Amino acid sequence: MGGAREPAAALTINGSRLLDTIHSTCEFGKAHVYGEHPTETGMARLALGDDDRKVRLWFVEQVKALGCVVTVDQMGNIFAVRPGRAKHAPPIMMGSHLDTQPTGGRYDGILGVMAGLEALRTIHENGHETRGPVGVINWTNEEGARFPMVTMSSSVWAGSTPLETAWNCLEISPPGGSAPRSVKQELARIGFLGDIPASYTAQPIAAHFELHIEQGPILEDESQKIGVVTGAQAYNWYQVQVKGRDSHAGTTPMRARKDAMLAAAKMVVASNVVAHEMDGLITTGIFRGEPGSVNTMAHTVTFTLDIRHPRSSSVASMVAKCRQRFEEIATQDSERGVSVSWETLTENPAVEFHRDCINAVEQAAEETCGRLTEAASGRKLWRHMLSGAGHDSCHTSLRCPTAMIFTPTRNGMSHTPDEYCSPEDCITGAQVLLGAVLRYDAARDDLS
Amino acid sequence: MGGAREPAAALTINGSRLLDTIHSTCEFGKAHVYGEHPTETGMARLALGDDDRKVRLWFVEQVKALGCVVTVDQMGNIFAVRPGRAKHAPPIMMGSHLDTQPTGGRYDGILGVMAGLEALRTIHENGHETRGPVGVINWTNEEGARFPMVTMSSSVWAGSTPLETAWNCLEISPPGGSAPRSVKQELARIGFLGDIPASYTAQPIAAHFELHIEQGPILEDESQKIGVVTGAQAYNWYQVQVKGRDSHAGTTPMRARKDAMLAAAKMVVASNVVAHEMDGLITTGIFRGEPGSVNTMAHTVTFTLDIRHPRSSSVASMVAKCRQRFEEIATQDSERGVSVSWETLTENPAVEFHRDCINAVEQAAEETCGRLTEAASGRKLWRHMLSGAGHDSCHTSLRCPTAMIFTPTRNGMSHTPDEYCSPEDCITGAQVLLGAVLRYDAARDDLS
């Protein structure tokens, strides 16, 4: 990476068009009204569902209108690339995702893709010719909500997850109790099962930039506008199964019980103690007991653990501590005799983003924040930070220079219908995204 | 109640016919194979399902062959009455239930009805004329598993639950995600929506005897054969709802959480402490979290509490303690700010059975146990005991003299496929049932 060969183009995104785009496309999958304003509605646009199909078709139409070449790979990832002066160089991509949680909001993922589209529109309408190609990616099934594998398709692209594993992943709550469908079946059904391999070799990327809401309270607490994300904390997911004995709630003395429900509840409480001890995060998002009858003890309980820490080694320590405490509960506590088994769903080491991409974001943040009215105070309006969540960028960073940009999130709340990033902050974030891409493009030394 | 006017008829049930009846009718609804023998299979004969319909039709056919008059009331309770010398007196009934838990066994309820049928067959084939009418009842939806109201239809008969409340009760896990169906709809569908009021005034009973497996470990632990049940412990059921805030598992600091799942897990653990403090029983059989995604905290958790104690006042104290501890968790603990609400599903005070019925059971137990080979040791093979579970007899005891007979249960395990009462113990129990009924019949002083 050399120095900038030309000054960053002074292009300014169209803020109201960005906001219109975000909210008009949230008609595809809107759910969970929480206020009176038409935008005070959350989202339930589950990966590869009918609403996901609609927003994808809309997206493809929009980027084609900008002269983009659209490629859909075998995971349904959509690559929209606007050619640059150097026709055959790999593109700088602005990637995120259009799928949401079942009780999700209007910004997680959506802001990143729509800001990428707005950046392309701004480049296009200004007739700006980039040195290399520049484009937008919609990564399939980032949320892992319907198909329980988070950042599924960027992981396949990066070579971290085999294609067949992702294709065969089944939905967890099929509608109407029907047989669960696979990712591949649903890709085919909605018309997004492409024939290009989902791979960094088949679809190389020069650099990946992702604008995303912070999903935490730090920027808001510090009254800052932009997070320059230098990496992401490590996180592992597990499914823990506790097996006991189903027996009658009225006739089984406490001493004779092997109550999987009570044992599992104790494990959830114990995992929380571990999180506090290690200054990390542990969350149980799914907890199910079988057979599920008021007066019958559960014979089987299955629950998930989401374990996170800025250091990969600390995640490993937290897992080890949980395993030990759970084993103690299973062998020495009131329900001794229950069995515990662990299944690993995903393990993701801590990620460090690329210095060149971080530099480009820093410069764009400095410039954009410097123009905000809040800058009059002389206070610095951006900061470095670490991502608490996993993102598609964590996978791309294994295969190409990557960085992320965060915007403030009201009350730090995400994965909830009233997730919110103010219009001003969305616009600031999109402007930083465009600025970072143009700076990176200007400084590329891999172009002939 | 006068003294015995004639000696109890020396009738002996046909043990192998009883066992054949139990196991052949368990073909209707068998599930959950756990061993190699054809009878090593549990049951899933949910109330008012297709298998319940089949066993009901079979039952009606069998009792009609014995000359019984069959009445089906508005709750689908089946009354099969064999006339006695006094044609218009209320009958002595042997009642229990043919429905099972979703992962139930072959004895809970089923033994009581089939032993009643065997008793009628024995009376019939011996040409014995009882002084008053004698019969068998199949009570609808004792389990409360599919339709969440335990001992539903004996409760309606006793006037404790309004007919409309029971009729409108909806199934909890409709097949294939279809709209939940009501008890009344399902009664009509399977052809057991009778037109006789489900009421102790419309269908009076002289006395109610119920043979049932103990469902606990006491008889087995003491190597005894028969429990003469003098009453039942009090039990209340509640549904507790905890509401917190759904937010992202990776970006929400521990201090900023209102995690309904963690708070509910702490409540389940706290309720268990209360059970130990009060020497009672508390069980959580159902526990569900929403929205149910690995990396999203639950905004809502719903769980049940089944609270039991031999004294009604102690159940009230346990409830009060749980309410206080849960409130502390909701207001002072790590997840402070979550809300807790309680819904009462059922409240059942402790029950004392009728002295005359208990006497009849005692005498029959003394006689039957005295003939067992184990009696050679001179050890007493029956004991008084209290029922841990609720039974239809708890409701009938409000409206007619009632008692119950318990048989041993392997490992005290019930509401599980491998629930087991040995062939010998089933036969002993049925013989005690017949003996108690004949004694009570012989001693009736309400017959002209």
Image: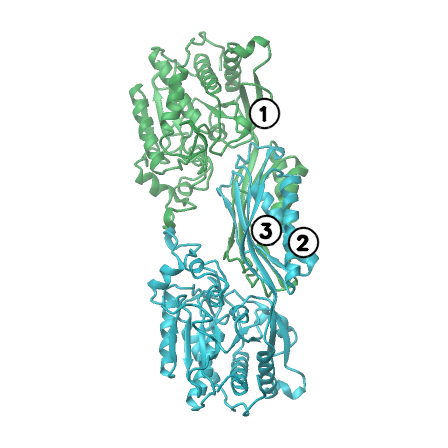
Chain colours: A green, B cyan
**Based on the displayed image, in which of its 4 quarters is residue B263 positioned?**
top right
Q: Which residue is mark 3?
A: A264
Quarter of the image with the N terminus of chain B in it: bottom right
Residue at 33% x, 28% y: name it: A71
State the image coordinates of residue A200 (x, y, percent, origin top left).
41, 29
Query: How far separated are the C-alphas under marks 2 and 1?
Result: 38 Å
Query: How far separated are the C-alphas under marks 1 and 3?
Result: 33 Å
Secondary element at image label 3: helix
Q: Looking at the picture, which amino acid does disc 2 mark?
A: Val
Q: Is residue A289 above or below residue A190?
A: below
Secondary element at image label 1: helix
Q: Nearer the viewer, residue A13 or A223?
A: A223
Residue A322 visible, this orientation: no
Residue B448 visible, this orientation: yes
State the image coordinates of residue A373 (x, y, percent, origin top left).
52, 10
Q: Nearer the viewer, residue A423 or A136?
A: A423
- Disc nearer the start of the sequence (1/3): 1
Residue at 39% x, 47% y: name it: A174
> Which chain does tag 1 point to?
A
State the image coordinates of residue B258 (x, y, percent, origin top left).
58, 37
User: Tag 1: Cα neighbours inside 10 Å, few (<14), some, or many (≥20)?
Assistant: many
Q: Looking at the picture, which amino acid does disc 3 mark?
A: Ala
Q: Which residue is mark 1?
A: A218
**Is disc 2 in contact with disc 3, using a CB cutoff of under 8 Å?**
no
Q: Which residue is mark 2?
A: B273
